[in-house]
Each structure stands twice: as C-alpha cells, then as structure tokens.
Image (cartoon, grey):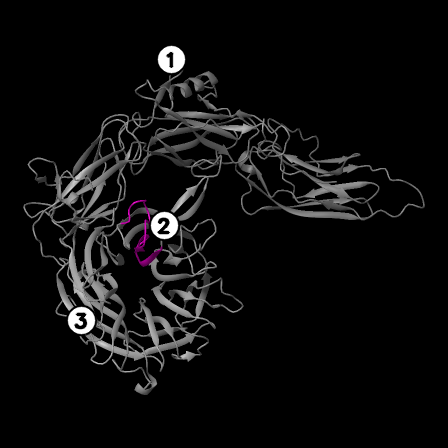
Amino acid sequence: MGHLGLAQRSGVKLALKTPALVITSLLLASCGSDTAPPEAIRILGKPPGTAYLGVEYTYEFGVDGGDGLVDFSMTNQPRWLALEYVDNTFRKGVIMRGIPGVNGGGTAEDALTPGEAQEVSLTVSDGSSVGETRFSLFVDTNTYESEALTVAENAIGERPSKLIDANNNGQEDEGEEKEVIPLCFTDAEGTPLFSEEDIAFFEERQQDDSLAVRPKLHYLPVFLEQPSVQRVILRYSLTSGSGDGATPGSDFLIETARKDGQVISVADGFLTYDPGVRYCHVPVFINDDRDAEKTENIAVSITHYEGGLLEFADPVNTTISITDNEPVASFKVSKASVSEGHYLNVEVTLDKAPEQTVYAEFVVDADNSDGEFEGADADLSLYTGEGGVGSLITDGVSVPFEAGETSKTVKLQATANGDATLRDEKVTFNWRRSGTVNPSEEPLAVYVNQWLNAVELPLNSGASVAEAISGSQSELFLARVNGEEAGKLANSDIMIYDRFGALHQSIKLEAATYAVRIKDIWLYERINPANEDEITQDIYALLEVGGLFAPPVEPLQESDLGGKDVVVQKYQRINNVGAFELQWAKQIGSVWDDEPGALSVDLSQEVLVVGATSGLVGEGENSGRRDAMLIKFDKNGALMFAKTFGSSGDDVLLGASPESSSNHNVIGFSDGAVEDNGSSLGGYDAVIVSYNDDGDPRRVAQIGSSYDDAALDVSTVSKGFVSAGYTNGVLVSGERNRGGQDGYLAYHQNASEITAYAQIGGAAADSVLDVKSLGDEVYVSGVTAGDIFDAGAAQGGEDGWLARYDVVKEEVLDEGEEPGEGEQVTKLKNIWRFQQGAAGNEKLSNLATFGSAKLISVEEAQTDSGVKVTLKPLSVVDGVDLNAACRADPNGDC
C-alpha cells in the first residue's frame, strides 16, 4: 500500500483509453466458511492540491480492505484527468494521471481553474462497504523565475553543475562527481549557440593576464516553477539598470566572438528548455576594467517566447549588480590630534595593491568641520616640504600609489595662529572617488590641540591626584588631595584647566579641624544639539570628611555621625560663563568610619555612591569587618536609598560606572563569600556586580585566584564594560602570572562573565591604577617596580606605564577553514604600550580621555620635597606626547 507524490515525466503523452468516470474491476475473493469477514474498504492518501498547465500531474491512492467486486468513481473530475486501477502483489490502488491543457481536449485556458479550487470526490465500493475521499484541485499556470545576482567585477563565475549522487544519500561524498548543467542558450528556433568548446574558450580567455580586456563569464539562473512536458523557449534582454546603470558594451558585453570567430549577440537571446528541464542560465559577460566605479546595475527582462503553455505567466524582471574591484582607499585611523605649529603624519592605505599607478583623493568635509581650512587663517594645511609652508587643502589632496604599493604617508601641518576657540577645532576629511581608486566611507577627524606645554604641580608630601576627567569644551577637571603641612590638615581641590592648559578655577575643599579628602568627581553635561555653545555642566564631587562638612541627609542628626563620613556635592556652570557654583551638598554616614570609594551618575542624573563602612549606613546590617555600602541621591540631592551588606569578611566597593539609564556596574574586592552559598576563592577576590535602579544586584561575579586579587576601577564601553586591577595569580584559565603581582584588564559583556582578558605584568610588582574608555578604545595606566613590557625599560625605583587596548572582534580559523568560515571572537587587542620613568619613584596615576583624540596623562613623581604632578597631552594614536620634538620637526617620524 502507499501513494505516489507529484511526479514530473519528461515527454510523456497520455492516451485516455476511456472517458468514463466509472471503472469496474473484478476482484477474486477467497472462499470458505471459516474466513473472517473483510475489513471495510478505505482510501489512503491526500493528493497535491495544485496542478500546472503543461506539467504532468500524477498521484496514486492506496486502497485497503474490502472484498469482491470493486467499483470506483470520481465526481467533478477535470476532463484532463484519467483514472487507472492497479492490483498486484506489490500494491492496490487508484492512480490519477493527466496533463492540464494537453489531455482531454479543449484549450489551455479552459483547463485553468477560474476561481476557487475545484472540489473533487473519489469513491470506492466492494458492494458491501464504501470508501470515499474528498480533495481540492486547482489548476494554475506554470511560471518562470530568476533571482538578483551580485558579482565582483574581477570574479570568475562558477559553471552551474549538479551532483551525480552514486549512493542516493542526498549529499556529496568523497569521490562523487558533478556534471555541468547545459547552458540552454539558443537562437529563436532552439538551436544552441555555444558549444562546450566555446564555453571552455571563454573560461580560458577570462584568466589570460596578457589580454587588455578579460570579460568574465557569469551565469544567471532562470528556472521554471515546474518542468514542462513540452519544449519552452524564453527570451531575455540585458540593458542598463536603474540608479547607477551599467553601460552596455563597456561594463558588460552586448556581443562576443565564439571560438570559431563568429560574433554572437549576448545582450539579447533565448533560453530553450527541453521537456523535463527546469534550469537554464543566461550567459553574462562582465568587463574587468581599471576604472574606479560605484556598484552598477544591469536590468534583466525575461519574457515567454513559445511553448510549454506559459503564455499566461507574468514577465520577470531582475537585476545583476556589479561591484567594483579597484583598490579602496582608507585612513589607518579615524581620528587624530596635532598640536598647533606641529606636524601630523597621516597613513593612507589601499585594501589591495594596484596593477598600475593610481591616485587616491580625499577632501575636506566642510559640514562636519569647525576649523578653518581656507585662506590665511587656515588651521590645517598639507605640508609639501616647499619652504616649510603647507599648501591649502581646499580642493582636496591627491595621493599617488605606484604599482604594488598599499601604504603612503601624508603630512599635515597645523598653523600656529593662536585661535582662542572654546574647544579643540576639528577638520574632517572624506574620501572621494578618483578615476582609479574607490573611496571608503570612514572619515578622518583631525583636531588641533592648543595645550602646548606640560603643566607641573609641585605638591607636598602625602598629596595625590584622585581623579582626572575631561569636558566637551576640551577642559580638564582634576581632583587633588593635599597632604598635611604646617599644622594644616589634609584638604582638597577641584582644579579646572582650560584647553590651553591654563588654570581656570580652583574649588577649595577644606575644614579647620578635620581632614577633607576628595575621592572622586564626575562631570555631567547637557548640550543643545542645535547650538553647542549652549551647555550646562554639573560637577559631582565625592568627599571623605572627618567632621560635619554638609547638612546630614534626613532623618540623620549630627549625633548619628562620627569617624569618617561621606559627602556628595553638586556644582554647576551654564554656557561657560563665570565659575562653577555649589548647588547642594549632603552628608551621610554612621558613628564608625565610612569610606567612600567612587560615584557614578546615570542619564537621569541619579548619583550612585559606593564604598565601605565599619558601621551601618542605611538599611541592612554589618556582617563582618568592613561591609559594602551603596547610596543613591537624585539630581536635587534627595536620598533615594542607602544600604549596607556584606560577608563575614572584608567587603569594599571601589568603582562604579553607569550601564544604562539607571543600572550601574560596580567593582571592588572581598575576602568573604559575596553570594549566598558561595565561597572565597582564596585571599581577597575581585568582585563584579551589576545593580538595578533600586540598588538590587542583577548579576554578581566573584573572580580570583588562591592569592590576593582586586578590581580597582571600571569604565563603560560600547557594549558592556571593562574592569581593571591586580592579581597575584591568574583570573582566567590559559593565562600565566608574569611574577608576583600583575595588573589585569577584563572586558565584560555582562557582570557574570569575563568576555576578553589581558594580564599585564613583568617579573616585579605591577598594578593598574586607572582605566578610561572612548567607545571601544580602552586606556589603562599604572605603576611597575620593574620591566613591565620590554627588558631594560626600567629606569629605577618605580615607573609609570600606559597602554591602549581596543575591544575588537577577530576571526579565529581552525585548520582547513577559509576566511569567512571561522568563529568571531571578542578580544582585547593591544594597540600600543610604553613604560616611562626616571631614577626615582613615578607612577601614571590617572588619565583623562578627550573626544578630540587626545589624552591628558597624570604622572606623580616622588621628590625630596613632596610630589610633583605633571600633566601632558598625548595622542590616542600612539600614546606619544603631542608636543614631542619629533612632531615639531617636519621630517619627524612620529
């Protein structure tokens, strides 16, 4: 028993031997009084609901049960459909066969179903029982289709083929071969125009480098929805497409010579499908020229010419897109900074080596530039080496590449004109298409830096810099702690430097009878998109104080405070006018020591404070020595919540960074178990927690080795965040400890995992002290007691170090894999790194990252009289001082 599916038979013609709707067959039944009565007769199977003009339709119903004489009939049977009964050792059933529009007389149009599907009934009876099945049958026109095709100008088309499946397992096995699919390219009578020898000739010609023009042969598939029992001829034409249309005869051939020299038109032609054939291909010859062009389009029109009853099918239109293969020019970096009066080397690259001399061109994007590039006041010009004067770049820059070259350097010169603008001026460059090189879409933004000298701050013993941050106006905000001296207790400053390195304002934070130490600052800016000069800037400051410095949060009284407490302040300046003024200040704590670690401000201007307490701040309980504390204020200084929590050990939160409009990622360390049913990994462990708007943990991770480890800082990147600190072991498998204490940098897509990791260290003690980010660029600085990167780099005592890592996705290929087949793995890719110092003890304690492609590094050096702090502008491209001697020299190589 069983049934057949819709079968396609090439060239089959059915003769309907009987037009009758009832066919009777005699079944011989076994006799005997002991035989059990037969089961009721029934029909098995469900036929396809659609038949097509000119395509054979066949289906076999199985018949089960019944006995004796069998009658079967069909109600509402199409005239083209015939019935046949089979009964043998292998099967018993009723077969339907027919070809709409061919069998049964009438026209093809008569065979089409005019409206809804036709309801057909098949009945089978043995005289004592009746089986019936009903099904819908719709006769539709056969159609033809194609698909859009995109080809590279220099690519070679692959000849269509099909697998010779020797073992019929439906997949390609070793040793099995393929056979090519006939092209079907013919004249109007169906006579083939290209032989296999011609195709071999074309394929050989397209790879001949000695030819000036090497048209590449591609194959556009055009297929019938169902193979017809009749021969079908379709007609096609290739013309210039919409948009950037390809030029006939130039971008693609309209005619070509066969091997015998006869010229054949290929822009208009015919495809002939023999009975049973479903696939044919339009031959398309693409010219591989040396002109840089946009993606160009060929319009393809396909219509029915004759045969196969396809005259009712709609014409088909599709597109062939030709992508150019000439070199694409790009800048090696997307942004750079150059000091006024200095030079900038801009590396320009091609993605492939040219075969001849070519020219890449870039121009100024005036709409996205605020610097001058015209006339005597031009901020930036092209240095040509002629008399030490640059040439204006109003009309763009043309960069020549000889055959085989893929990289060239262009030198720009920043004019020393002393412009007193509010922010670092920017000139943006975009690529334009030359005759021989295509443009990339990545621009280059060049900023003019006017912080032209290092700023030195001699401080007393015990002084330090707590934080350094940048503003959109290219200013620097510095949080400085001053040590005790001459009977004066420790105090602090918020120092604001303008873009020239001049001190604009210093906010003094001190008390007569107790120490005031600033721990962190945060800048929140609101800029009018229509006018960048309309700006409101808020500075949030986090202080550790030893007495009553600000009004306590309600309902706390002064008697509820003691030891060290937490103070949060907000200062504001509008439109760069005047000084920052205090808006509010709040104090919170317990009678024990409360140690603020850091603050973080989200998009709602809600302020999250993290730290540690030896007492109880807000809700919760003290579970051990120091416990973690979490405090949140709204933008007006109202307390939203305060919480204390921790393990039986020491739990300290040191850093926080906003994740979204209200969530924050927080880091620190603990020597207890920070999760229920968790445990310490040994010594202190790094702690990573994501908190929601209500201060409840969303994700928690305790990361560590069997030694002491700690997360010291955190910064947000495009998707996720980075944490940094130190480890005395390793934090991920596969890494190794370089010796003693190493620094580490980890990228987290979320707080539950380390997505990418870099362990930074040498044989001596090393640590990360600060981490800042610009998008997916991550900058880390710290201190080392030896050679952290390169042997022999140590200058004596402790040195500072600085490095840039980018969060990138790179393809990892397993053996045998081709590019594009590998797994995309997220990595922390080191871009540059260096160690700096002198004979004494130095450290790079802080960094400030600027959107104008520069950093300000904060170096702290121990001196006989205290601490010397040096502020220097550095390039994000290579980490080198923007005012280095090599940048002032037109022949410099940095």
| Apparent side of residue 855 relative to residue 237 in the rendered image (left or right) | left
Q: Which residue is mark 2?
A: 762
Q: Quarter of the image for the C terminus: give it.
A: top left
> Which span of residues is magenta-colored?
765-794
Measured in 3D between alpha carbons, the distance from the residue under mark 2 to the one under mark 1, in whole angstroms, is: 73 Å
Quick check: can you spot residue 877?
no
Of labels 2 and 3, earlier in sequence is 3
Assess whether residue 786 is covered by the magenta stretch: yes
Measured in 3D between alpha carbons, the distance from the residue under mark 2 to the one under mark 3, in whole angstroms, is: 40 Å
Secondary structure of the residue carrying numbered label 2: loop
Picture layout, residue 805 above or below residue 459: above
Q: Residue at x 38, y 19 (%)?
A: 205
User: Residue 383 in the image: x percent, y percent?
Assistant: 12, 39
User: Residue 322 in the image: x percent, y percent?
Assistant: 34, 33
Q: Which mark is residue 261?
A: 1
User: Residue 154's image quarter?
Assistant: top left
Q: Which residue is mark 3?
A: 507
Question: Extreme right residue here?
Answer: 33
- Asked whether 329 or 643 is in front, the reply is 643
Q: Which mark is residue 561?
A: none
Picture layout, residue 389 above or below residue 854: above
Q: Residue at x 32, y 68 (%)?
A: 598
Quick check: can you spot residue 89?
yes
User: Residue 593 in the image: x percent, y percent?
Assistant: 35, 77
Secondary structure of the residue carrying numbered label 1: loop
Query: Mark 2 or mark 3, which is nearer to you?
Result: 2
Of labels 3 and 1, earlier in sequence is 1
